């Protein structure tokens, strides 16, 4: 078929879409309206959860064949013509050693974090940030083909991506997208979403429809006339996305520096607690963080005491940065919240949940651990009327400097709680 899009008005663009939708062999009728299409969304989501779990448990293996990822990608590749060959990007290519997520453990973990973030997040901004964070790892051979995984998690945010879709986009919009580069994909995605928003009445909130439209153009089912009048300044769009990516990277580096320090202090507290004979709990969301030659949760307990597990406060208590448990009784002796640069509010709330929600541990001592320069800020926040009830708790402040200077000596010669109290200061007046 031939589409003459030499100067399409919005009305003419609408007519093109309607012509495409009426074509029984085009992707709209043969794939988008296919009843089996929607059934795969849930199974693919479950499959990606399995991929994340296997990578984190280090049971994923070092090959694509037979992996949980192969199962997921195979089910995507079965989604008729638009996803035919979707598995090619994930097949292990031994001569090129790509994609490098089978032999490099760090890259594998970055891929798992990317998937896990996208499985849990809800917003457009979070998905884009996850993409940019993955791209910053520069994992060889792992590019925008991952958008086909994300489409089944966020069909209203992420359009599918393959060679035919890119060719169709370039032909229809007069652009010059290069396959395999995340910034180019992100710029293309914004334009696709804008076009879809304009024509949502004739397309769908699900970006699979507009992707199918571009796929049929790019695969040669429809030949276009003169360059489209809806062409835009692609280079300007791409430059803007590059700037946004650079800004996001800069912000991420700053946040990573803070996060590294936060993790480092958690590691100090973990090692010190173990050296003093306590059992140690690391916050649920931090156990897998890299620390030293292993992970932050190495050598720590994997289950909180029974009274905590039976309480309604479990979810909040499990997020306290570090807990020291008495080795004999299993009771929580000390709780530490590391406040590197954020408000102390969430940490205080978690401590309150422990103190008030689990009476069996009411004798615990609570510590806010923060940079020396933040002591005045922590004290001013703690003095707010909103924290009046907290002042009934035994909450103390430990500066990074004191902890750094004395932790080794305390670990070698200290006497449990007494040594920690010696380097801390009371917060309540």
Image (spheres, rainbow, N blue to C red):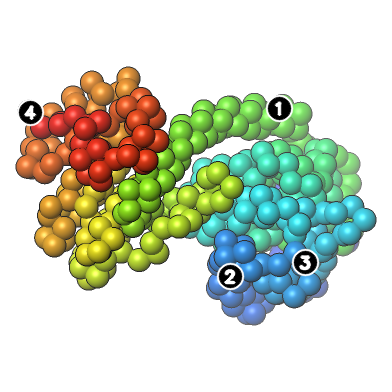
Residue 257, percent across and down?
51, 31
At horizontal 60% and vertical 67% (from top left) the residue drawn is: 54
Where does label 4 land, which residue? Answer: 429
Q: Could you tell which of marks 1 and 3 lies nearer the N-terminus? A: 3
- Residue sitting at x 23%, y 21%: 376
* Image quarter hosting the N terminus: bottom right
For the point 63% across and 50% down, the residue is: 110
Residue located farthest toward the right when viewing the structure as drawn = 95
Cα gap from disc 2 to disc 3, whole angstroms: 16 Å
Q: Which image quarter: residue 230?
A: top right
Of residues 93 and 58, the one nearer the viewer is 58
Say whether disc 4 or disc 2 marks the residue closer to the N-terminus. Answer: 2
What separation in Å lies between label 3 and label 4 (alpha carbons)?
Answer: 60 Å
In the image: residue 411, left or right of residue 124: left
Q: Is residue 247 visible?
A: yes
In the rendered image, residue 414, in percent from the top left (x then y), is placed at 29, 40
Give the x, y percent position of residue 215: 79, 58
Of circles 4 and 2, the one toward us is 4
What is the residue that sits farthest to the bottom in this orientation? 36
Label 1 or label 3, whichever lies nearer to me, is: 3
Q: Is residue 155 visible?
A: no
Q: Nearer the viewer, mark 3 or mark 4?
A: 4
Pointer 1 local density, CA inside 10 Å: few below 14, some 14–19, many at least 20: some
Q: CA distance from mark 4 to mark 2?
A: 50 Å
Is there CB contact under 8 Å for labels 1 and 3? no
Question: Which residue is under mark 3?
Answer: 63
- The tally of labels here is 4
* Residue beneath disc 2: 50
Q: Say the numbered circle drawn on residue 239.
A: 1
Is residue 273 shown left or right of residue 231? left
181 w.r.t. 281: above or below: above
Query: Is residue 334 shown above or below 86?
Result: above
């Amino acid at each position: 078929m031939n589409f003459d899009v030499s100067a399409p008005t919005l009305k003419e663009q609408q007519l093109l879409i309607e012509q495409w939708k009426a074509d029984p062999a085009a992707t709209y009728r043969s794939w988008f309206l296919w009843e089996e299409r929607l059934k795969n969304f849930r199974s693919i989501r479950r499959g990606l959860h399995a991929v994340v779990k296997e990578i984190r448990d280090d049971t994923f293996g070092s090959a694509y064949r037979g992996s949980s990822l192969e199962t997921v990608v195979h089910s995507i590749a079965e989604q008729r013509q638009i996803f035919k060959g979707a598995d090619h990007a994930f097949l292990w290519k031994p001569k090129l050693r790509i994609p490098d997520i089978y032999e490099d453990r760090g890259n594998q973990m970055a891929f798992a974090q990317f998937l896990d973030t996208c499985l849990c997040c809800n917003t457009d901004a979070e998905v884009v940030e996850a993409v940019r964070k993955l791209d910053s790892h520069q994992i060889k051979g792992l590019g925008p083909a991952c958008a086909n995984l994300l489409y089944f998690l966020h069909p209203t945010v992420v359009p599918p991506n393959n060679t035919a879709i890119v060719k169709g986009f370039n032909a229809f919009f007069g652009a010059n997208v290069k396959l395999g580069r995340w910034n180019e994909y992100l710029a293309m995605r914004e334009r696709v979403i804008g076009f879809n928003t304009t024509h949502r009445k004739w397309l769908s909130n699900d970006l699979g429809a507009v992707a199918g439209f571009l796929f049929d153009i790019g695969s040669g089912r429809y030949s276009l006339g003169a360059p489209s009048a809806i062409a835009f300044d692609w280079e300007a769009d791409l430059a803007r996305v590059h700037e946004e990516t650079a800004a996001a990277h800069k912000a991420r580096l700053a946040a990573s520096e803070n996060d590294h320090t936060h993790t480092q202090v958690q590691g100090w507290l973990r090692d010190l607690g173990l050296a003093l004979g306590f059992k140690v709990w690391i916050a649920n969301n931090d156990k897998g963080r890299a620390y030293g030659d292993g992970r932050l949760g190495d050598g720590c307990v994997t289950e909180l005491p029974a009274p905590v597990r039976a309480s309604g406060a479990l979810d909040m208590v499990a997020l306290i940065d570090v807990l020291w448990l008495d080795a004999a009784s299993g009771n929580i002796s000390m709780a530490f919240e590391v406040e590197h640069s954020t408000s102390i509010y969430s940490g205080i709330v978690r401590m309150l949940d422990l103190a008030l929600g689990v009476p069996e541990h009411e004798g615990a001592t609570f510590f806010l651990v923060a940079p020396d320069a933040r002591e005045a800020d922590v004290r001013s926040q703690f003095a707010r009327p909103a924290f009046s009830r907290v002042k009934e708790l035994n909450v103390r402040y430990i500066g990074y400097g004191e902890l750094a200077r004395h932790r080794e000596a305390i670990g070698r010669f200290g006497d449990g709680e007494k040594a920690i109290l010696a380097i801390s200061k009371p917060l309540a007046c």
